[in-house]
Amino acid sequence: MRRQWSREARLRRVRLWLVFFMVALVLSGLTAFPLESELRVLAGYWPGSVWINRVYGALRDVNARYPFLAYGYDWLAFAHLVIAVAFIGPLRDPVRNIWVIGFGMIACVMIFPLAFIAGAVRGIPVWWRAIDCAFGVAGVVPLAICYREVRTL
């Protein structure tokens, strides 16, 4: 038997999940700015990883010779921050802005074809593409909960 939630409890639950999602988006975006430093630390903790060391070396070399290419990561970070801001609407009025939650769910699902198609073209290992897809799952689950709850409101 499914538990009956009051309207206020449903709204509180939706808002908590939305805040979680927004914080995750912001944190994910902020990590795109210092990518070379983060990879240096990761390579230090995981020195046996051929893939991590290869990526770190490539990024270090590219940043030394062509620092303007990192501007693409800056835009990636910015996009995460902007998308998080878009969820202020559902945070304030989830019923009126349910379409934003639906948009977020679609974006999370679209990670899968991007990771497996573009990842294959770019030579990204399958296990790394699966990690990327995990971010889509981590996003779609709270948004699906929100969507279901908002539909009942």
Image (spheres, helix red, strand yellow):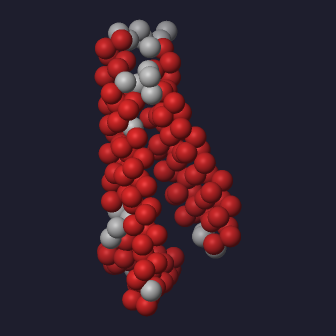
Q: Is residue 10 above or below residue 111?
A: above
Q: Nearer the viewer, residue 51 or 98?
A: 98
Q: Is residue 140 above or below residue 72?
A: above
Name the side, left or right, on which 123 lies relative to 71.
right
Find residue 111 and report its horizontal and vertical position in percent.
Answer: 58, 52
Find residue 141 and report its horizontal and vertical position in percent.
Answer: 49, 36
Q: Is residue 43 visible?
A: yes
Q: Is residue 36 above or below residue 8?
A: below
Q: Nearer the viewer, residue 17 or 3?
A: 17
The residue depicted at 43 percent of the width and 55 percent of the height is 79
Q: Quadrant of residue 89?
A: top left
Q: Is residue 28 visible?
A: no
Find residue 121 and report its horizontal and vertical position in percent.
Answer: 68, 70
Q: How many marks?
A: 0
Name the side, left or right, on which 20 lies relative to 2.
left
Q: Is residue 23 above or below residue 33?
A: above
The residue depicted at 42 percent of the width and 47 percent of the height is 83
Find residue 9 and report its horizontal and vertical position in percent.
Answer: 32, 16
Q: Nearer the viewer, residue 84 or 136?
A: 84
The residue depicted at 67 percent of the width and 67 percent of the height is 120
The residue depicted at 63 percent of the width and 72 percent of the height is 122
